[in-house]
Amino acid sequence: MLQLRPNCELCDADLAPGSEHARICSYECTFCADCVDNVLDNVCPNCGGGFVARPIRPSSVRREGVSLAHQPSSDERVHTKYSREEIVAFAAAARTIAPQNR
């Protein structure tokens, strides 16, 4: 089950379950679109992968047992362990390599 984290791991912006500004990598690292575009250059600072828009879990039940009410978002805030300087250097080294080739 995809973990819907409540915040950007870099700037700590709130990312509600229905946020269209949430971005995730294949390891579910979660960042806001602004950080992905303007700081990370589409390079996950934790794994080096690229980002996609985080899927939005349905808020209302359309199939029995399947909805945000049944599988709620996480309330545990997560922060990257790397400094902003480390992140910028890491992104600079990988940003010209397409995510599928990293």
Image (tube, rainbow, N blue to C red):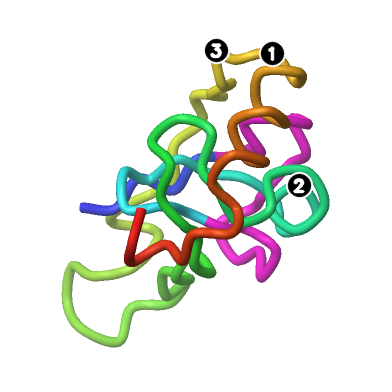
Instruction: Answer left or right for 83 relative to 53.
Output: right
Amino acid tagged 3: Lys
Say if mark 1 contacts mark 2, CB within 8 Å: no
Q: Which residue is mark 3?
A: 81
Q: Which residue is mark 1?
A: 83
Residue drawn at the location 64% of the way across and 53% of the way down: 16
* Magenta: main secondary structure: loop
Few, some or many C-alpha atoms within 10 Å of disc 1 (few <14, some 14-19, many ≥20)? Answer: few
Say if mark 3 contacts mark 1, CB within 8 Å: no
SS for callout 3:
loop
Instruction: Answer left or right for 80 relative to 25.
Output: right
Counting from the top left corner in percent of width and height, residue 37 is at: 75, 58
| Residue 35 - label | 2
Quadrant housing residue 18: bottom right
- The span picked out in magenta is 6-23
Amino acid tagged 2: Cys
Counting from the top left corner in percent of width and height, residue 94 is at: 54, 46
